[in-house]
Every structure is written in C-alpha cells, then in structure tokens.
Image: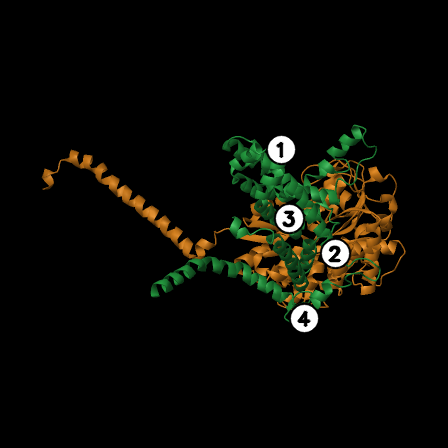
C-alpha cells in the first residue's frame, strides 16, 4: 500500500488537507469567542469585571462640569452620566425617586428633608482616604480656628449620622457622614461696577431705589428669603434671632418688604437658573443682583466687568456634598466611593478652586495648582501673572486681587447658611404671594 | 340573539385597549391627584387623611385680604385668564387671516404645503432656547431698542418690551398661533368653493363673503383652535416664567413651586381647581358647536 503512495502526491495533497484543518481551528476559535460572549450575557463574574460601570450623577448644572467627568473616566474607566436639574428638584428626586440615580450632589440644607425619609446611606468615613483632611468648616464650623456664623442649616449641624441607615442626625462626629463635602462658597451680591460707578458695601443696596428696574433676586424661595433677610437687617428694619429659622411674623415682615419693593418696580426680573443670572447681568438688564460665584466668573469670561461684591454684613454661605442612595449597592457603590476619593484627591479640587469655589480638602488641591494660582485664589494676593479659567479664558489680569480677599477673610465672614425652616410650608406660600404681587 | 351578543362582546373587546390605556394613564393618575388633594404633608412625606384644609388654604383671604388687596389665588387666576383671553384674541385673528391666505389665495397643493411647513418653524428649536433668544432682541440693549434709539424715535431704551405682560403675550402668540391655523385651515379646505362663487354672483363684496360665508363655516375650526390655545395658556408656567422675568404669577407656576417643595397635597388641590376652571371653559365653548356632528 505504502509503495503505491507517490511522495509527490503526498506533498501535493498536504496543503489540501491543511486548509480544512485550519478552518476547523478557526471555527473553534470563533466558537470559543462566542462562548465568552454568551457567558458575558449570562453574567459570569470574570466577564463582568471588565464591564464599564456608569454612575448616574444627580445634581445641579453648576457643578456638573464636562471636564471633570472626562478626566475621571480617563483616570478610572468609570463613566459619569450627569442628570442636571434645579436645586429644588434635586431634593424632590432624592425624596420621591431615590432609585433614579446612583450618586447625589446636593446642598447640606436639603438634608433636613432627605434624611428623615431614610433614602440616603451614611457614608463610611473609613472608606474615604482624605476624610481627616476635610476642612474644619464642615466638621467644627471653624475657619482658621475661629467660629463662623451658624444661622441656618450650617453643615456641622447635619454632618453626621449615628449609623449607616439612620434617619436622624448625630450631635457628635461619628463614622458615618451624611454627605462627603465637595464644594462650598460664600455668596453675596454681584454688581456691574461699570454701570453702577460707585462703591457698594451693604446688602441694603439691593433695594435702593437708585437701582429701580435694574435689580434682581433669585426665585428659589429657601435661598431668596435668606438674601431678603440680609437686606432687611442691613436696612435696619429688624434683627433676626435666626435668619435660617424665621417665625411666621418674621416671614411676613420679610415678604412684605419684598412686595413693597416689587410693586415700586425695583426688580427687573427674578432668576432661578444659573444661566439666567449670567444672561441678565451680561446683557445689562440688571446691574445688581443675588449671584453665585461661577456666574460672576462666567460674565467676566465674556469680557464684561462684574464684581462679586463683599459686603459689610457678611456672606450667605452654602455647601454641597456627595451622598449615595440606599439603592446603590455592590459594584456601583464601590464606584461611588472611588469617584468621591478621586474627587477629594486634588485634580477636581484645583479645577473648582480655579472657578472661584472652594474645595473640601484644600491641601490636595494646592498640590495640583500653580503657586501663583494658589496665591491669587486662596491667599488673596495680587495675581503674579494673568489668571485663567479652567477653559483658558483670562479671568483676571496680572496685579488684580480676588473679590473678598483670602479664604480666611471670605469664609470667616459667613453670616448665615442656606436653610430649610420649620415654617417652610408657610414661607413657600408667602413667597408665591411675592411672585404674584 | 347569541349572534348580537357575540358582536357586542367583540365591540367591547375592540374598545378594551384604548379603555385600558385611558384608565391607566388618565383616570388613575387623575383619581390619585384628587385623592392626594385631601391629604396632608410634612416636609418629606405624604400623610393620608381626609381634610379640606388644602382647599381652604388656596382660598386664604379670598376674595379680598385685610389690606384691601385681592387674594393671591384670585389675582393669579385673573392674571392667567388675562393672558388666556389676550392670546386667544390675537391668535384667532392671526390664525384666521393666515389660514384664509393659505386656503384661498395660495394656488396649488405644493405651495400650500411648503407655506404650511414654514408656519411650523417656531417649533424647530427647543422651547427654552427660543425664549432665551428674545432677550437680545427685546432687551434694554437689544436690537429693537438699538433701532428705536438709533433712529431717534425714543430718547431712552423702552423697558416694557421684555419681562412684561407684553413679552409674555408676544411669546404665547409666537408659539400658539399654529394651533389656531391648523384647525381653521382644515375647516376652510372643506368649504365648497361653489358657495363662494355663489356669494360673489349674488353681489357680495369680498368682506361680506368672508363675514357671512367663510367665517360661519369655520366655526368648528375656530372653536377647536380656541380650546387648544386656552388650555395651553392656562396650564403654562415656563413661558410666563421666562418672558415675565419670573415676576408674573401663573397658576402653573404656583403648582410647580409647591411640588418642588414637596407640598403635593397643596399642589394637587390647586391642580384640581385649575382643571375645574379649564373644564368649565371648554364646556362653555362646546355649547357653541356640536363637535361630533361637525367633524
């Protein structure tokens, strides 16, 4: 038999038999791949590990910067999906639909509404790398060792929970934080110095008839009422025992003052959205109004002169932080902690500081900022060179000094905090009266 | 007998899907709203109860408060109604004129279709962008004021162009004229052209033809358009908010503020009252036309 085999035909036959062989291997290979894909669908853990996690991040548009999400994804592979809504709607969703997001960025004052629902999970301080470096403003209500104003819902009052699933606040520091602080600031009036042409030094100027038809106040009742209270005190009409928790009579007085001003035509508009305030100021419709720091920055980057004016009565402060609803578990919860740790690690902090905010952990942010930037933003020193926004627009020329000066001068000047009052329902009803007047 | 019973069962079966959709997405939510309007709420939760307190609160100080002012609810409804009537009047006039032009003056279906699509241009951008872009046009330093001051017509910029009743009505007209044009145009296209010829042959002037022939035959379209416009304006809070500089109250705005402060029972009570008012208006309009017969 073997003699019959012609070596030539054998060699010639080899490639012929080789091809199906290759095909078979190829088939096996693709079948294997299909098998992996199939297990991927059924959810075997080893395939799952490679899967990208997406975090649904509920907050206001002011804090939801595209650059932050992109940098975080580049660093960790975790995707951030922003859900931008208004301040009031963040609270509403936290109370009514806690499964519609994985991570919440909300203000401390709204915790008085959210925590009693039991929808938020206490944040385990042990899992936060920089927890002990969080500024004393949050943990003790102090700036550089000095107590600051604590009227209203100061963060230290709502900072801790007795347990991970508690529905009330702890008086003393514990292992569980309600929110891990991210940004905070002290708000004041924004003005157009080029159109006002004289120094402004008091909250009372908001209702000065000189600016009739050129003033604005914000239409978020719980914050607007605080600005109004600052004005009422500055005008010498009344001194509140606690602006952040008014009695019905005090609410009546405050709203009455607003209504009188409105009827006299003081307000050009009321605003509710960050962009609206930028628009009003940049277009010159309004020359003095309650404003947020990044809105002032936004007006300035358009090349329009705008000042975040420090006032002698002090600032109305606010603070925001990250929380996690109880419905976030497993991989997503880990990703949330990863995001928060990343956020406190410096890059994001530096980014926020350059927008005029303050970051919760200052030393990590300092490491990611240039010395001249730190000197301008945090120490209140004249700019050694042009100061640029994170997008590269020039915000301040060489030699300029930041409004309100250093961190200590500014945050030390806090008079009150954004708040939820005991008479909140009554306040909202009265606020509607102001809008209707 | 059994035959008619099966066909009756069939008819019910055929109507069932729509009935189910209506029950699930309309009747049930509405019933919930009515139910919640009798509940109470704390800062963060709804408390089942049966109290008329929410309704009483809505009408606090009505009709006239101690200071001699109208109560907030009356003032808000009056303001909303005013916008409703003004917008209705202007959109009806404009809608009728435009539909008349499209139906009787424009020759050829192609041209009619093209012009009809042009009418929908306001809907091509988002609501908010559309309204924000009024600011550079009507603002203190806007185009219109630049033109007025530049041409020497006025010395100081005109302030009432923006954040005023005027700007609110302007935005409403801009948005809702389309809702008038469509039904009126539809009615006009169904008018038998020989009627118009007959009117002309009988010596009617063009105005007389419009007034005595076209207008009565367009009644159905006018009324359907009116229902659209009134219902839209009564429930709006975005347009009034943005164009009124948030300084003008509207019923929708009041409800929105209350829901965002989690005062759902109050908001529900307000919604029920608004619904009743709008339904009354629609019932009144329906008395003017028998929709089922005319369509």
Q: Which mark is residue B51?
A: 4
N-terminal label among 3 and 2: 3
Where disc 2 sits, the SS reads helix
Query: Mark number for residue A221?
Result: 2
Q: Are marks 3 and 1 in contact (CB under 8 Å)?
A: no
Q: Are marks 2 and 1 on the same chain?
A: no
Q: Nearer the viewer, mark 2 or mark 4?
A: 4
Dot 4: chain letter? B
- Would you name the residue on which mark 3 appears? A64
Tell me which chain appears orange.
Answer: A
Q: Are marks 4 and 3 in contact (CB under 8 Å)?
A: no
Residue picked out by circle 1 = B205
Viewer-nearest of labels 3 and 1? 1
Q: Report the Cα–Cα distance between label 3 and label 1.
A: 64 Å
Indicate the position of residue A236 as horizontal and vertical percent values: 90, 56
Q: Chain of mark 2?
A: A
Tags 3 and 2 touching, CB below 8 Å: no
Quote the CA–CA distance across marks 4 and 3.
42 Å
Cα distance in 3D space between marks 3 and 2: 23 Å
Tell me which numbered mark, 4 or 1, is placed earlier along the sequence.
4
- The answer to whether A103 is drawn above or below residue B146 in the figure is below
């Amino acid at each position: 038999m073997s003699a019959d085999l012609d070596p030539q035909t054998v060699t010639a036959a080899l490639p012929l038999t080789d091809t199906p062989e290759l095909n078979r291997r190829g088939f096996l290979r693709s079948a294997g791949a299909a098998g992996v894909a199939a297990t991927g669908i059924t959810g075997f853990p080893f395939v799952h590990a490679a899967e990208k996690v997406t975090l649904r991040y509920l907050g206001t548009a002011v804090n939801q910067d595209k650059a932050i999400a992109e940098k975080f994804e580049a660093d960790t592979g975790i995707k951030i999906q922003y859900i931008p809504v208004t301040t009031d709607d963040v609270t509403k969703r936290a109370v009514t639909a806690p499964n519609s997001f994985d991570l919440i960025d909300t203000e401390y004052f709204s915790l008085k509404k959210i925590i009693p629902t039991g929808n938020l999970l206490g944040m385990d301080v042990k899992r936060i790398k920089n927890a002990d470096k969080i500024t004393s403003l949050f943990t003790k209500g102090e700036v550089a060792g000095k107590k600051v104003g604590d009227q209203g819902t100061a963060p230290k009052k709502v900072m801790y929970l007795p347990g991970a699933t508690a529905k009330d606040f702890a008086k003393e520091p514990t292992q569980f934080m309600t929110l891990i602080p991210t940004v905070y600031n002290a708000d004041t009036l924004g003005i157009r110095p080029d159109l006002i042409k004289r120094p402004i030094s008091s909250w009372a100027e908001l209702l000065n008839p000189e600016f009739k038809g050129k003033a604005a106040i914000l239409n978020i009742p719980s914050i607007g009422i605080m600005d109004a209270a600052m004005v009422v005190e500055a005008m010498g009409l009344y001194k509140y025992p606690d602006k952040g928790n008014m009695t019905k009579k005090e609410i009546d007085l405050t709203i009455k003052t607003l209504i009188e001003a409105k009827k006299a035509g003081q307000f050009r508009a009321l605003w509710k959205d960050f962009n609206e305030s930028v628009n009003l100021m940049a277009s010159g419709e309004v020359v003095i109004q309650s404003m947020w720091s990044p809105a002032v920055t936004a007006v300035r980057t358009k090349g329009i002169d705008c000042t975040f004016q420090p006032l002698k009565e002090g600032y109305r402060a606010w603070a925001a932080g990250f929380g996690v609803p109880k419905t976030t578990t497993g991989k997503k919860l880990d990703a949330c902690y990863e995001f928060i740790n990343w956020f406190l690690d410096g890059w994001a902090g530096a980014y926020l500081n350059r927008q005029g905010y303050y970051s919760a952990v200052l030393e990590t942010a300092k490491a990611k900022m240039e010395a001249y930037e730190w000197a301008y933003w945090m120490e209140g020193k004249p700019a050694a060179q042009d100061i640029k926004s994170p997008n590269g627009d020039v915000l301040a020329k060489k030699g300029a000094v930041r409004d309100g000066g250093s961190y200590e001068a500014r945050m030390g000047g806090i008079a009150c905090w954004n708040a939820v009052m005991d008479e909140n329902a009554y306040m909202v009803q009265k606020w509607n009266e102001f809008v209707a007047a | 007998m059994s035959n008619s019973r099966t066909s009756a069962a069939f008819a019910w079966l055929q109507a069932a899907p729509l009935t189910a959709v209506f029950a699930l997405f309309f009747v049930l939510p509405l019933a919930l709203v009515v139910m919640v309007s009798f509940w109470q709420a704390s800062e963060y939760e709804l408390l089942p109860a049966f109290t008329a307190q929410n309704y009483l609160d809505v009408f606090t100080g009505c009709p006239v408060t101690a200071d001699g002012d109208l109560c907030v609810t009356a003032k808000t409804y009056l303001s909303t109604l005013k916008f409703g009537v003004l917008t209705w009047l202007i959109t009806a006039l404009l809608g009728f004129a435009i539909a008349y032009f499209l139906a009787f003056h424009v020759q050829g279906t192609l041209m009619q279709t093209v012009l009809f699509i042009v009418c929908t241009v306001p809907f091509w951008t988002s609501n908010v962008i559309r309204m924000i872009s009024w600011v550079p046009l009507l603002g203190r330093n806007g185009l219109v004021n630049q033109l007025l001051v530049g041409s020497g017509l006025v010395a100081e910029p005109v302030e009432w162009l923006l954040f005023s009743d005027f700007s609110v009505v302007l935005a409403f007209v801009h948005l809702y004229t389309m809702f008038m044009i469509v039904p009126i145009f539809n009615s006009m296209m169904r008018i038998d052209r020989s009627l118009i010829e007959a009117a002309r042959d009988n010596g009617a002037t063009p105005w007389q033809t419009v007034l005595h022939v076209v207008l009565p035959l367009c009644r159905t379209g006018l009324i359907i358009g009116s229902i659209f416009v009134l219902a839209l304006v009564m429930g709006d809070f975005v347009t009034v908010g943005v164009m009124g500089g948030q300084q003008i109250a509207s019923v929708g705005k009041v409800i929105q503020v209350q829901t965002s402060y989690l005062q759902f029972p109050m908001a529900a009570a307000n919604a029920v009252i608004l619904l009743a008012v709008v339904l009354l208006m629609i019932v009144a309009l329906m008395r003017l036309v028998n929709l089922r017969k005319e369509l």
